[in-house]
Amino acid sequence: MADAAERVPDAGVLAEEIFDGLRAAMEVFAVDVGVRRGLYEALASHGSMTARELSRTAGVHARYAREWLEQQAVAGVLAVSGPPSGDDVYERRFALPAEHARVLVDRDDPLFLGTGPQFVVSIAGVLPELLEAFGTGAGVPYERYGRGTREGIAGLNRPLYRPETVRSWVAALPDVHGRLAGGPGGRVLDLGCGLGWSTIALARAFPAARLTGIDLDDASVEQARRNAREAGLGERVSFVRTDAAGVRGGGSVDLVTVFEALHDMADPVGALVSVRRLLSPSGAVLVADEKVSEEFTAPGPELDRVNYAFSVLHCLPATRAEGARVEAGTVLRPDMVRGYARGAGYGTVEVLDIEHDLWRFYRISP
Ligand SMILES: C[S@@+](CC[C@H](N)C(=O)[O-])C[C@H]1O[C@@H](n2cnc3c(N)ncnc32)[C@H](O)[C@@H]1O
């Protein structure tokens, strides 16, 4: 942070940074091509390949296969051996090192980022609408960002939702953990559940608990249902398409979780109010949201930069399309969470001592 604060305006430095950004952006698009055309998967399962072999295996044109393979090797993603130039460059062999396959192919690896590029690329698809919205102040609905955003976010977060990991997060609320882990198992609501990976992980972590995932996006809820069915979780897990601010129902809930979704809700106070009515007196809300600076900091650290960029291009416009009342944007600071909780009539907000590179965790109690 000190580095950022000490930064002196310099045209050369900014030009270099933007040029680096252009390169990184173009390389991210090329990674997306590799993921979505199954090129990394082909390389991971066949070992080293020539352009023609990749072309046959993955069903892509040989000239494109060659250019992509060379680009990936130059970018340091693939290893290469064979003629440096002149001879038949189609004889070069390219391989995906096992360590890189963890990042690009293995969806369960904690370092998997293969679907992340889709999220960035999906923003390009709504850019004309976004430019228009900047003028009119309108929003860009979440569903307009499409599958790339839905699956991109879900794919980025899925490796974070291992049963043992989510169990350790809930263990930071020992009383709630005790109720979920013991006897009848308790009840959990997972707000803004997306494709349901957090709900599924919670169900695996607490085999006697009943869970309901809630999300405003139709396509996400349908996919979450399919994912839970495929995970064989049966009746214990269900999904409801509704605004978190309009959650109804009887019974008492032991835990409400909101993983990287509170900042996306147009009415976070309304969402907290609606679940407070369902929470048992000893229940709690566990929020995980961006680990940004506690105060506006400019120039800011890396995490603030990435979250602000997503805010401008995705979260703020998507929230405005919901009919925003609060318009948090992605940069949700602890004081904002405290303000929402107070506004919703909760008694306490505690920042939890959970180690995480990207998120800050809060316990909100009635
Ligand atoms: C960044 S995504 C996170 C999804 C999921 N928790 C995960 O970690 O993969 C935010 C989610 O919040 C959902 N969302 C936004 N506004 C909502 C609202 N008012 N009520 C319920 N869900 C909402 C979006 O549809 C989206 O699925």
Image (cartoon, rainbow, N blue to C red):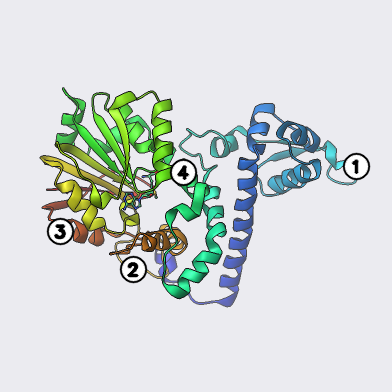
Q: Secondary structure at mark 3?
A: helix
Point 63% across, 33% down: residue: 41
- Badge 2 crowding class, 10 Å Cα cut-off, few under 14, some 14 to 19, many 20 or more, is few
Amino acid type, label 3: Arg
**Of the residues under marks 4 and 1, which one precedes in the sequence?**
1
| Label number found at residue 156 | 4
Quarter of the image for residue 173 reads: top left
State the CA–CA distance, disc 3 to disc 4.
Answer: 31 Å
Residue 87, labelled with which disc? 1
- As rendered, which of 260 and 344 lies closer to the eye? 344
Q: What residue does disc 2 label?
A: 296
**Alpha carbon separation for disc pair 1 and 3:** 71 Å
Whether residue 165 is situated above or below residue 234 in the rendered picture? below
Quadrant holding the N terminus = bottom left
Relative image position of residue 58 (x, y in whole percent) = 71, 34
Q: Is residue 294 something one can see in this rendering?
A: yes
Rounded to the nearest whole Å, what is the CA distance between mark 2 and mark 3? 21 Å
Could you say which is closer to the camera, residue 223 or residue 361? 223
Closer mark to the observer between disc 4 and disc 1: 4
Name the amino acid, label 1.
Asp
Counting residues from the start of the chain, the first of labels 3 and 4 encountered is: 4
The 10 Å Cα crowd at callout 4, few under 14, some 14 to 19, many 20 or more, is some
Using the image, determine if residue 128 lies above or below residue 268. below
- Expressed as whole percent of the image width and height from the top left, the position of residue 357 reads 38, 47
